[in-house]
Amino acid sequence: MGAEIVVVGAGVVGASVAYHLAAAGQERVTVADARARDLLPGSTGLAPGFVGQLSATTELAVLAMDGVATYRSLAPTAFRQVGCLEIATTQARLEQAHADVEHGRGLGIEAQVLDADTAVALAPALVNAERALGALYIPSDGAAEPIALTEALVAAAVAYGVTFQWGTRVRALETAHGRVVGVRTDDEVLPARAVVLAAGIWGPALAASAGVRLPMVAVQHPYVRTTELPDLDDTPIDAPIVRYPDHAVYTRRHGRHYGLGTYSHDPIPLVAAAETAERPYRETDFGAAIAAATALVPTFRTAGVGSRLNGAFALTPDELPLVGPVPDLPGLWVAEASWVTHAGGVGRHLANLLLDTGDLAVDPARLAPDRFAQWSDERVYATALGHYRGIYDAH
């Protein structure tokens, strides 16, 4: 007997989709992924784990709030609600922080503006006392450990009866009579009433096997960590995550290390997706941006940089994920270009759409995979890359 629904991809998004489908009563859900259960070679395994809810885009805020609710209920040890500080280093940003408090209130997200001394006291290793004029503080934000979070979602899905087929590489979508009827692996065809692509940067190639274009572009992104610090223990995080919006820099604790990423560099597309989302770190691409970022964050001024990471993730032309059915190919659904921040909400939205529950917090048209159908490939590519730094503010 074939599965009713096959989900392709067992990263945080695919695991969330499977969990929400099964929790809503869907039987015979199978998730296929080439990875081993204890490995996460896609974007999920490389993600720094920031979960920020306040966004200029209402849909992203709603999805993130839903994600926080899911993570708190399923994975309290993998998601810590430590809060977020957005440091104002200019008067304009401080004024924006006050406006963001009102914006957050309208969305149901509590926020407040702190003075510089209070912000420094909350995260002294990460808040630059010489530059901070104040900070926007969002106490319900937090930090996830993406690998543990994904495992918690997998375990919850399995408890509802979902089957995970590890080491199963999906090579193509299987079609018949103008619709998707399953997926083709190295060994067999897995039949299904519906297929959900949640394959991250590998999604476009699988969609293309059935003549479908997914309007997303993979882009490379740097993240560095300090060397192990003797005054830290294995506690994953014990202070707010910290963002510097004026500089497109973000930073947090990771146990015995601190981590930092930056968007303040030219976007670098990933031309061909390999077996892993991790790419070689090149100093010529990221060195200047990382140097500026580490000079901004106090602990990075004294601690040496240990690991350097270059991980790829997907962008769309409007910074929103692709979630929903593909109109021109019945049976195919996608949950693509989503971050850890929004994966819990994306999984619920996709499940409610597919099962037609009527419980939708986001307008489906805003996330529809075909919303750029009239755009050329060149326009999709250029616009998506042009938003690379902009996603820092949107997310």
Image (cartoon, rainbow, N blue to C red):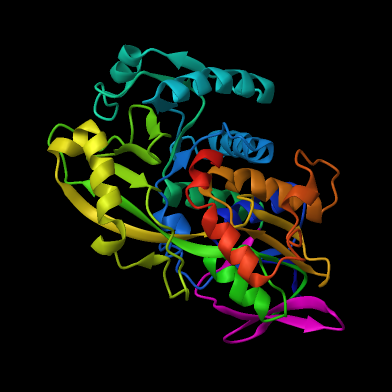
Query: Which quarter of the figure has residue 41?
Result: bottom left
The correct choice, above or below, for 230 with respect to 34 in the image is above
Residue extending farthest to the bottom is: 187
Q: Which sits in the foreground, 220 or 210? A: 220
Q: Which sits in the foreground, 71 or 48? A: 48
The correct choice, above or below, for 42 with respect to 188 in the image is above
Q: Is residue 185 magenta?
A: yes
At which x and y percent is residue 214?
Answer: 66, 67
Residue sitting at 60 percent across and 38 percent down? 64
Q: In this rendering, would 187 be left or right of 28?
A: left
The correct choice, above or below, for 341 with respect to 169 in the image is above
Q: In this rendering, would 173 be left or right of 149?
A: right
The correct choice, above or below, for 98 with respect to 363 in the image is above
Q: Is residue 27 magenta?
A: no
Q: What is the span of residues highlighted in magenta in the rendered image? A: 162-189
Q: Which image quadrant: the C terminus?
A: top right
Q: Which sits in the foreground, 60 or 155? A: 60
At which x and y percent is residue 202?
Answer: 55, 70
Query: Which quarter of the figure has residue 249?
Result: top left
At which x and y percent is residue 26?
Answer: 77, 55
Tell me the chief SS of the magenta region.
Answer: strand
